[in-house]
């Protein structure tokens, strides 16, 4: 069972996505802001991180940079999630260190494909 860290400040999005992932066999841990996400990612071992980019305390861009610059967490795949899909956001997320990028509202089959591909690549 893959262990996912979902970093999302919107309670409705967090609840909906975590339940849908759990129903598909993922173990899901939750963080409500970027700082808490970085702290949890450093305290536990995750197979992947779903990182909202618009977060309080520490935004997703900076949280991703912090995790990718830390030797203990740099190998954990991160998928950047954003509702503000503007031109250049994908590139900005990848430059921050995200391994992939997805837009909200979440299309679960597409997100699952990305998650499974990144987890398989990490394990290979």
Image (cartoon, rainbow, N blue to C red):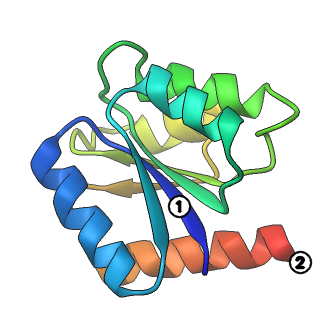
Near mark 1 (Cα within 10 A), the count class, few <14, some 14-19 or many ≥20, is: many
Near mark 2 (Cα within 10 A), the count class, few <14, some 14-19 or many ≥20, is: few
Q: Quadrant of residue 39?
A: top right
SS at circle 2: loop
Q: Which of 88 and 112 is in front in this view?
A: 112
Residue 61 percent coordinates (x, y): 49, 26
SS at circle 1: strand
Seen as rendered, the residue at the extreme top is: 57
Q: Which of marks 1 and 2 is in front?
A: 1
Q: Name the residue under label 1.
A: 4
Residue 14 percent coordinates (x, y): 24, 52
Q: Which of 108 and 31 is in front in this view?
A: 31
Q: Nearer the viewer, residue 68 or 14?
A: 14
Q: Can you see residue 107?
A: no
Q: Residue 124 carries which label?
A: 2
Residue at screen point 44% across, 62% down: 28
Residue at screen point 31% across, 41% down: 8
Q: Which of 89 and 77 is in front in this view?
A: 77
Q: In which quarter of the image is the C terminus?
A: bottom right
Residue 33 percent coordinates (x, y): 36, 27
* CA separation in Å, label 1 and label 2: 18 Å
**Is 24 placed left or right of 16 in the picture?**
right
Residue at screen point 78% across, 25% down: 69
Q: Residue 79 carries which label?
A: none
The correct choice, above or below, for 113 with respect to 64 in the image is below
Seen as rendered, the residue at the extreme front is: 43
Q: Can you see residue 79?
A: yes
Residue at screen point 66% across, 56% down: 46
**Is 81 placed left or right of 122 in the picture?**
left
């Amino acid at each position: 069972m893959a262990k996912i860290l979902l970093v999302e400040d919107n309670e409705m999005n967090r609840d909906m996505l975590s339940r849908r992932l759990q129903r598909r066999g993922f173990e899901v841990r939750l963080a409500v802001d970027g700082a808490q996400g970085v702290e949890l990612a450093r305290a536990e071992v995750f197979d992947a991180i779903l990182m909202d980019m618009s977060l309080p305390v520490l935004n997703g861009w900076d949280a991703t940079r912090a995790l990718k610059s830390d030797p203990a967490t740099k190998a954990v795949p991160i998928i950047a999630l954003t509702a503000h899909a503007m031109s250049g956001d994908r590139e900005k997320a990848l430059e921050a260190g995200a391994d992939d990028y997805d837009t909200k509202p979440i299309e679960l089959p597409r997100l699952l494909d990305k998650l499974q591909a990144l987890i398989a690549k990490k394990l290979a």
